[in-house]
């Protein structure tokens, strides 16, 4: 599986956009980019994922570079509740006998995002 | 609400005791996983079950056993607990299920285990 590199920590002012970078220079063609976050003591929460196109949902936007070697998670209007550890993960899509399944997630250290008032 | 349910939420064991952590999901997911998270660390995969009837070792399987009881349930057993197994244990599920529109993992709220 491709490895990812994230800054260990970032700060953001409340109400501003938080842009979290991730480097995945060894990503292969069948690997997706996933983002999760973990708020203190809770289980990780799915945010968004993408293959090569930019994606947006109600939580965030994901911008993937054309060469797919890096991506940026954007929280458009960060709130104090967005303070969490953010994990960028690449995950292969694999077929199995029962249909399509998706490879297991391998978590790195993530980025600790602190949103300040 | 649909999701992943873990029991118990907290447990204290003495060294050498055994216990089983229970996990159940109601999303009709094919795959289930057990992770552990030590303080200040990321999650590490212990065991996973890609589909009912199959289990495989993850990154840190030593000292654990698992059972995929049926499609809904995936249990983790510690046969002889050690202080090094003090951790927070998370169960997760993923895959194509009824109404699934994303293919990410859904995690339970965790079991906080202390071995003394």
Image (spheres, coloured by chain):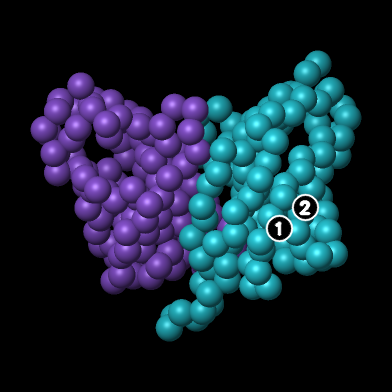
Q: Spot the residue most to the left.
A: B16
- Of badges 2 and 1, the one in the foreground is 1
Q: Secondary structure at mark 2?
A: strand
Asked whether A55 or A65 is in front, the reply is A65
Give residue A79's position: percent from left, percent from top: 78, 27
Q: Are marks 2 and 1 on the same chain?
A: yes
> Can residue B109 be seen at all in this image of the molecule?
yes
Left/right placement of residue B4 relative to residue A36 reads left
Tell me the subunit letter for badge 2.
Answer: A
Q: Residue at x 77, y 25 (%)?
A: A11
What is the quadrant of residue B113 in the picture?
Answer: top left
Residue A71 has which mark?
A: 2
Q: Is residue A50 above or below residue B65?
A: below
Q: Quadrant of the N terminus of chain A?
A: bottom right
Give residue B95's position: percent from left, percent from top: 51, 66
Q: Spot the residue most to the top.
A: A117
* Chain A visual colour: cyan
Left/right placement of residue B61 relative to residue A109 reads left
Categorize mark 2 by other alpha carbons within 10 Å: few (<14), some (14-19), many (20+). Answer: many
User: The chain shown in purple is which?
Assistant: B
Q: Residue at x 69, y 55 (%)?
A: A24
Give residue A15's position: percent from left, percent from top: 87, 27
> Can residue B91 be seen at all in this image of the molecule?
no
Q: Is residue B83 above or below residue A3?
A: above
Residue B17 has which mark?
A: none
Q: Secondary structure at mark 1?
A: loop
Mark 1 lies on residue: A25
């Amino acid at each position: 599986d491709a490895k990812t590199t994230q800054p260990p920590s970032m700060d953001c002012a409340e109400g501003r956009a938080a842009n979290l970078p991730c480097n995945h220079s060894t990503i292969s063609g069948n690997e997706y980019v996933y983002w999760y976050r973990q708020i203190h003591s809770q289980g990780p929460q799915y945010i968004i994922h993408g293959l090569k196109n930019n994606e947006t949902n109600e939580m965030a936007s994901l911008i993937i570079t054309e060469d797919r070697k890096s991506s940026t998670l954007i929280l458009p209007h960060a709130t104090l509740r967005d303070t969490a550890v953010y994990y960028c993960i690449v995950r292969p899509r694999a077929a199995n006998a029962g249909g399509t399944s998706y490879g297991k997630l391998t978590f790195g250290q993530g980025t600790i995002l602190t949103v300040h008032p | 609400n649909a999701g992943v349910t873990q029991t118990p939420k907290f447990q204290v064991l003495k060294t050498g005791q055994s216990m089983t952590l229970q996990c159940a999901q109601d999303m009709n997911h094919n795959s289930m996983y057990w992770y552990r998270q030590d303080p200040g660390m990321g999650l590490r995969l212990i065991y996973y079950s890609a589909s009912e009837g199959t289990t495989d070792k993850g990154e840190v399987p030593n000292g654990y056993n698992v059972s995929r009881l049926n499609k809904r349930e995936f249990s983790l057993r510690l046969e002889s607990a050690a202080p090094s197994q003090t951790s927070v244990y998370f169960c997760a599920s993923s895959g194509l299920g009824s109404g699934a529109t994303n293919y990410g993992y859904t995690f339970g709220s965790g079991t906080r285990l202390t071995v003394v």
